[in-house]
Amino acid sequence: MTKPVSRPAKRPRRPGTPAAAPAQRQSGKATKTGKTPRHFAIIGAGMAGVVCARTLVQAGHQVTVFEKSSKAGGRTTTIDSPFGSFDAGAQYFTVRDPRFAQAIDTVPGVCRPWSANAVRVLDAAGRVAAAGLPTREPHWVASPGMNALVTTWAAPLLQAGQLITDTRVSSIERDPLNGTHWQVRTEGQGGAQHVYAGFDAVLLAQPATPAQALLAVSGLDTPLNAALSRVTTAPCWTLMLAYPQAVRPDLTTLGPQWNAARSTHHRISWLARESSKPGRTTVERWTVQASPAWSAEHLEDDADRVQSKLLKAFSEVTGIRAQPAHADTRRWRYAQTTQPLGQSHLWDASLALGACGDWCLGHRLEDAFVSGLEMALAVA
């Protein structure tokens, strides 16, 4: 992957303030592909956005990545607690594309195989209905948390000032000082508003629904709208539990001996023992992901109510009746693609607008990698 870059960050431009052209475009130096260097705004610093940004930098372009959260990661978010971390989103990933394998090799030690290859399949009462899913390929996790892979790849962007966090893009507009360029309006912490200008293209590395909403609020008429509307995504409530009382010489686990399972319980679709993943602390911790149907039905419910219902379902499935020392919930409005786009990315050359994400190809983390990579290769 790329080495750290040292180009200065583009300074925020307040409304009505002229912005200087990006340094690379002023230099006139051709990129590795022989094209004139351009400045790309990338909205979203999940796997797709970070991979896209790094690939464009490698090709000799300038990027500014906007992320509404406090750090890069997207659905690989890792949530810390007094008892250890939880992978609140993506639980593991597979490696099928050789380009993904090559990229992972650039960060040795960050990704490790997880021994939970044989995922149990449970019936609604928690009984093992199948010994395990076929072990055709290993399950990989990043260490010490699932977000480590994306944040490691994003580190050079952050060091170069090309990754702006805690910043939500509220609209995309034509630059009034140069009608061929774009500017983006943003909202930061404390309601601070800024305008960043001088972009040759804007790439949306967000879930399909927010991307479509941003285009709509920006009043942009583009074929991307119709394509994005065909994508459907299911929500997910996630429950995180810690049981430090299980760490005793005579007790290694409170419940079942398996470390990961898919469940047909109407409330729960996935359970994983976080402490079984490599590089984690030994305190017994569980991440529970609700079923898409139940999550959709209870999407706007109070978090405490959701937590209570999922905790009850967890005890029914695992047999763990003990009260957890720590419990937390996380709502994902756009968790798993149910109807993908069917192609790796979207690109409107006439407007210089693009979109990428796992939803283009499926719901796996590797889908996000491929989408971000092929988006960058298409425009570089």
Image (tube, rainbow, N blue to C red):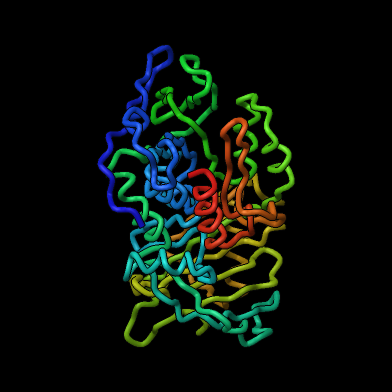
**Residue in the picture at 38% in, 39% down:** 30
**Residue in the picture at 53% in, 63% down:** 366
Residue 27's place in the image compared with 286, above or below, is above
Q: Which residue is outermost to the top?
A: 16
Residue 82's place in the image compared with 245, above or below, is above
- Total labels: the figure holds 0
Q: Which residue is outermost to the front?
A: 34
Residue 90's place in the image compared with 299, above or below, is below
Please state the horizontal and vertical placement of residue 101, each as a whole percent of the image: 45, 69
Which of the two residues, 34 or 23, is positioned nearer the viewer here?
A: 34
Please state the horizontal and vertical placement of residue 86, each as a whole percent of the image: 43, 62
Q: Does the image show residue 157? A: yes
* Quadrant of the drawing holding the N terminus: bottom left
**Residue in the picture at 35% in, 70% down:** 280
Please state the horizontal and vertical placement of residue 315, each as a whole percent of the image: 58, 71
Judge left or right: residue 11 versus residue 324.
left
Which of the two residues, 227 or 322, is positioned nearer the viewer here?
A: 227
Which of the 4 quarters of the picture holds residue 21?
top left
